[in-house]
Image: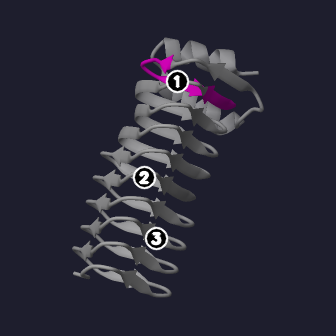
Amino acid sequence: DYQAAMDTQVAAGRVDDARWLLENFGSTNTVLELDHLEADNFVFAGTLIVHGDVRVPGQLLVGRSLQAGAGIRAGKLEVGEDIQSGGAIFCDELLQAGGAIKSAWSVEVLGHVRADELRTGWELRCSGDVDIKSSAQIDREVDVQGAMRCGKGLRAGGAIAVQGLLDVGHGIACNDHIECGNHIQAGWGIKTLGDLR
């Protein structure tokens, strides 16, 4: 059990050393349950369950899954498996999951988004690139300042606005207009109820 060593390093401000341990020794089957999480930085090798909200302005690294009953706000959020939030997710630098990201409300990231699958109850706003290996379902609008890539389908309940390349392996379905500053590439087809620019 090297969790105590990581806790000591994080407390000493050596988050990169704790990251090195997590990357080299891998995740554990330990489950940590908290009512709320508020810390400058936090590294946990197992599954983290937070019944309330999560506030970590620095780095939040989780070896397995992260489940939050309310919203998540972090500087950099990296999770080995799934992220599930009962509220909104806000990240300053990076939002990354080895599995799915599911947010009951919106996802807003100033940096990049990387995941296997993405599902939001509200909108998706990203200042960087969005890279989804499988499919993305956004119940409201999509606003991406960089490029957006989906290995399978992209479905949006509102408008889709992507400033960079929009590359989707299967199809794009949109209940409003689609606006792209670069190329749009869809492996299957595009269905939109509004304009296509």
Q: Which residues are magenta?
A: 37-49
Q: Is residue 45 visible?
A: no
Percent x, y of residue 11 = 51, 12
Q: Nearer the viewer, mark 1 or mark 2?
A: 1
Instruction: Give the colour scheme of this rendering.
Output: one colour
- In the image, what residue type sits under mark 1? Gly
Left or right: 104 in relation to 81: left
Q: In what quadrant of the picture does the C terminus appear?
A: bottom left
Q: Earlier in the sequence, mark 1 or mark 3?
A: 1
Q: Residue at x 42, y 39 (%)?
A: 88
Q: Residue at x 33, y 66 (%)?
A: 147
Q: Crowding near pointer 3: few (<14 within 10 Å), some, many (20+)? A: many
* Disc number placed over residue 113 in the picture, else none: 2
Circle 1 residue: 52
Q: In what quadrant of the picture does the N terminus appear?
A: top right
Q: Residue at x 41, y 66 (%)?
A: 156
Q: Crowding near pointer 1: few (<14 within 10 Å), some, many (20+)? A: some
Residue 176 among those drawn in magenta:
no
Q: Is 192 rendered above or below residue 55? A: below
Circle 3 residue: 154
Kindly state the secondary structure of the residue where label 3 is placed. Answer: strand
Q: Work out how far the residue at label 1 is from the one at label 2, CA to CA, in angstroms.
A: 23 Å
Q: Is 52 rendered above or below residue 66? A: above
Percent x, y of residue 75 = 38, 33
